[in-house]
Amino acid sequence: MFLSAIPSRSEIAGLVLAGGKSRRMGVDKCLLRLAGRPLIAHAAERLRPQVGQLALNANGDPRRLVEFGLPVIADLANGAEGPLAGLLAGMHWARASGQPAKWIATVATDTPFFPDDLVSRLAAASADPRTVRVAASRGGVHPVFGLWPIALAEELEAWLAAGRSWSVRDWISVNSSVTVEFDDRGAVDPFFNANTPEDLAVAHALLDKTEP
């Protein structure tokens, strides 16, 4: 009989998704400063203690991210764009890393307040080894904040190669999945994201509310 188990931290690789083109910001969004540090630093530092290993998914010159001391994984050259291409690249990286990762946890680079128990709660949401777990808050689903079985890599690669869809929601819809609701934890939505310069200004104000 097949026995499943809740993933442990050592079995989970983390990936900060920073592969977007930042059209609304007009600049390299992941390097924009919040409280004196790049947005990507906030995301990486928040995710690092929740996973067994960590990498950054970013396209372009990887040298601009060398200060973070983390592997920089570019989207695979299969014509696809967006978070699914980054997720697939992360799955291949995790498999090749030599670590015992069976899962990959993804977060967005522009969301500096996501929960510090994000991964543990996603991991505990199901014991099914092929079920995708996705975060939600305030009635909305946040599909790039997920815990993904690396065993789905071949299915995802075939999905993208066939040109089915680049939508994370569409990919989730064809897999077994569960949604985990995170409370508001005060006045700040834990999944507030800085998509525009105006959002970044709001993030500066919100940061004061999240600090002890």
Image (tube, rainbow, N blue to C red):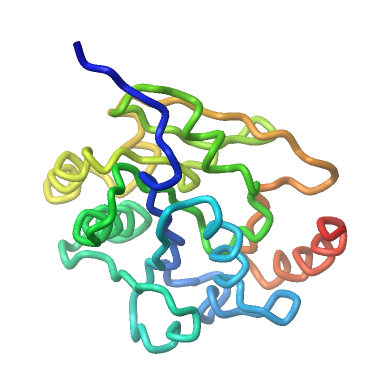
32 w.r.t. 207: above or below: below
Compared across the picture, whether 125 is left or right of 170 comes to right
- Residue sitting nearer the eye, 46 or 208: 46
**Quadrant in the picture for residue 167:** top left
Instruction: Give the position of the N terminus as an image quadrant.
Output: top left
- Residue sitting nearer the eye, 104 or 99: 99
169 w.r.t. 92: above or below: above
Residue 164, percent from left and from top: 20, 42
In the displayed orientation, state which residue is furthest to the top: 1
Residue 117, percent from left and from top: 62, 43
- For the point 77% across and 70% down, the residue is 201
Instruction: Give the position of the C terminus as an image quadrant.
Output: bottom right
- For the point 52% across and 42% down, the residue is 119
- Residue sitting nearer the eye, 150 or 190: 150
Q: Tally the marks.
A: 0
196 w.r.t. 37: above or below: above
- For the point 51% across and 34% down, the residue is 122
Residue 205, percent from left and from top: 84, 65
- For the point 29% across and 28% down, the residue is 130
Residue 55, percent from left and from top: 39, 65
